[in-house]
Image (cartoon, helix red, strand yellow):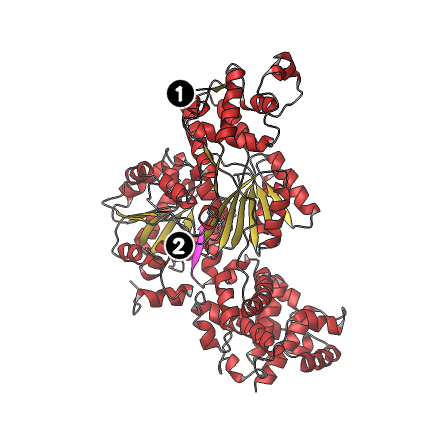
Amino acid sequence: MLQYPNLEQALKYHFGYDRFRPGQRQIIEDALQNRDLLIVMPTGGGKSLCFQLPALIKKGLTVVVSPLIALMQDQVEGLRNNNIAATFLNSSLNAYKVRSREEAILSGKVRLLYVAPERLLSERFLPFLDLVKEKIGIAAFAIDEAHCVSEWGHDFRPEYRQMKSLRKRYPDVPTLALTATATDRVRADIIQQLGLKQPSIHIASFNRQNLYYEVRSKTKSAYAELLELVRETEGSAIIYCLTRKKVDELTFKLQNDKISALSYHAGLSDEERSSNQTRFIRDDVRVMVATIAFGMGINKPDVRLVIHFDLPRNLESYYQESGRAGRDSEPSRCTLFFSFSDIKTIEWSINQKTDPQEQLIAKQQLRQVIDYAEGTVCRRTIQLGYFGERFPGNCGNCDNCRHPKPMQDWTIEAMKFLSCVARCKERFGMLHIIDVLRGAKSQKIAQNEHDQLSTYGIGKDKSVDEWRMLGRSLLHQGLLEQTSDGYSVLKLNAHSWEVMRRQRTVSLVVPVAQKVTWEEGSEKAVEAEILMQRLRSLRKQLADEQSVPPYVVFQDSTLKLMAQVQPTTLTEFGKLSGVGSHKLSQYGDKFLAEIRAYRQEKGLIDPPQVSFTPSVSLPSDTEIFTLQLHKQGLSVNEIAQKRNIRPTTIIRHLTDLIEKNQPVDLNQLVSLEHQRKIWQVLEVLGDISLTPIREQLGESYSFDEIRLVRGKWRRENRK
């Protein structure tokens, strides 16, 4: 076992965080004792760290079982960016890459291996695993998305059931089962199906305090509200719809309104879905409009807005889908648009089920969603209650708690409604009753002579939506009933007659149209946001050079700290949460330069001082390799081709080598005339971002040339 003075020091060194999230430390301590574990921790709670940090401390290989290629690739990218030796084996690799990765594993160069359950249990892979056990040891099996093992879970995968065989084959290797949502029944099933031995069970609270939950009526202005929400939101957004048709329509409308949006659903080709997902994850596009086919395995922490433009099918799905917002614990919004027409769509889908028991369960789940949407109590009380967690309410971060809806006396309107049901002989559905009340001139009304009734036209003062809201409320309060034979005919009961005889009053929560806005910040907060945008641009540039998502470089929460604290030395920069030892050496100078340039423009500090760069900054192994090829006279493109990496990455190596005072021949890369001109502009503008420098120079100058000369200029200005 590798030794650190304490777990916090190991956490800071590898991942850059100063403290553990709630529950993480105890779980890691148990994992280091080689115990079996069942970890139920909501999305964004930090489950992955619970097996990743022990994997770096314990000897041997930690095998992580993950159900999706996208998920394992995403996690491996993030680990490698922290200089952690991790890899994956899946169907996206050719035979040569598989062999080379297996050799690296057997030579002890890999700490974490991600595999799918199908490969893990294959006849070819198990003998390889036996060899790993013999040569370097297996530290643990981590079963991610462990709810897939249970038929009672929401993403059942039969192949997960076979993983119990691992326990028989490797009885001494501890198993960690991890999932974001699991009821009591699913938890018991996971323990049994995976053969966990006296596991330590850790269940974190399902309360995501950073998420703001709200429900809005889906009126004619719903799209305009959605558009405003998207425009108001800084960062990425996911919009869920029930059908592919809706997804395509909404994507088209958003694109027409100059919003960078893409669609995702099962009707697209695999290639198009994969491309759209990658563009969303890498911030090339801001909004993803999707069916529920999109989501599982999306490890994007900086989604700031999740909108359900249609009603979800059950509360567990809604919790999972809305929970894709704010995985980095930063404030984010979850908005549900609710309309009665969505209920009809879902009911039709439920009625297509052939199993009566399945229909019954689905209808019960739909009722729970409707109760959530129409609920007037704290949204968290309803959500957490679904998972068996008691919550007292008054969360202060949902629409019902921030803006309690006023109760209104609708007894007179209820008497009119129920009286109309009685006069229509309890033979019609809600829409017909509303048509009669509003005095509609429909063929159905004329045929049944309902235009002759005393209740015909007595409700013209209320809209269709208002009458429908009353009708649904009467049903929820038990003051009216509805047949479940597919026709939804309204029927009176004893309580209905009590209302009509004025023996019972009816109160209704009437939604008040309101715009919930985030609190305006101070002038200092606005200034920090301006710097934040510049840091985001730099992050995107660095991420694109490495072909990784921006959050792999730094998460939003770390950028926010940079903008607030504005560190001026590498020592200060290294203290920020989210800056580990590897990221400090890889990115520290670049982000400090951007912060320094911003502060200079604002007149906050003097020109750059020597403290921004360590006195001795040694080149990395990969930079030395590039330098050797450069000395052989190879061009940037030739080096890139030989190393099988992008030319922009080679330019970055050469720039860093120049700054580190290594013998790079700048004349070989940039003409003397261009060097002289770029230097002159740098002397005037100072150390700022590349775009304004290029604008000053003109299009005949490339960004690469400017970057290389700026490297030498920085080195000279530090002397």
Q: Residue at x 51, y 65 (%)?
A: 560
Q: Compared to 444, does 348 lie above or below?
A: below
Q: Residues within 10 Å of mark 2 (few under 14, many from 20)?
A: some
State whether residue 268 appears in this view: no
Per the image, the residue denoted by label 1 is 494
Whether residue 28 sits left or right of residue 82 in the image: it is left
In front: 642, or 342? 342
The question of residue 496 being in magenta is answered with no
Quarter of the rendering occupied by the N terminus = bottom left
Per the image, the residue denoted by label 2 is 46
Whether residue 359 sits left or right of residue 51 in the image: it is right
Q: Residue at x 45, y 65 (%)?
A: 578
Residue 222's x, y, as percent? Answer: 61, 41
What is the CA distance from the residue labelled 2 to the residue labelled 1? 52 Å
In front: 538, or 366? 366
User: Which mark, by number, is residue 67?
Assistant: none
Which secondary structure, mark 1? Answer: helix
Which secondary structure, mark 2? Answer: loop
In front: 599, or 165? 599
Hey, what amino acid is under mark 1?
Ala
The furthest residue to the bottom: 719
Q: Which residues are magenta?
A: 84-91
Hey, what amino acid is under mark 2?
Gly
Quarter of the rendering occupied by the C terminus = bottom right
Residue 570's x, y, as percent? Answer: 48, 76
Q: Residue at x 27, y 40 (%)?
A: 195
Q: Residues within 10 Å of mark 1 (few under 14, many from 20)?
A: few
- Circles 2 and 1: CB atoms closer than 8 Å: no
State whether residue 605 appears in this view: yes
- Tell me where residue 152 sits by quadrant: top left
Residue 139's x, y, as percent? Answer: 31, 54
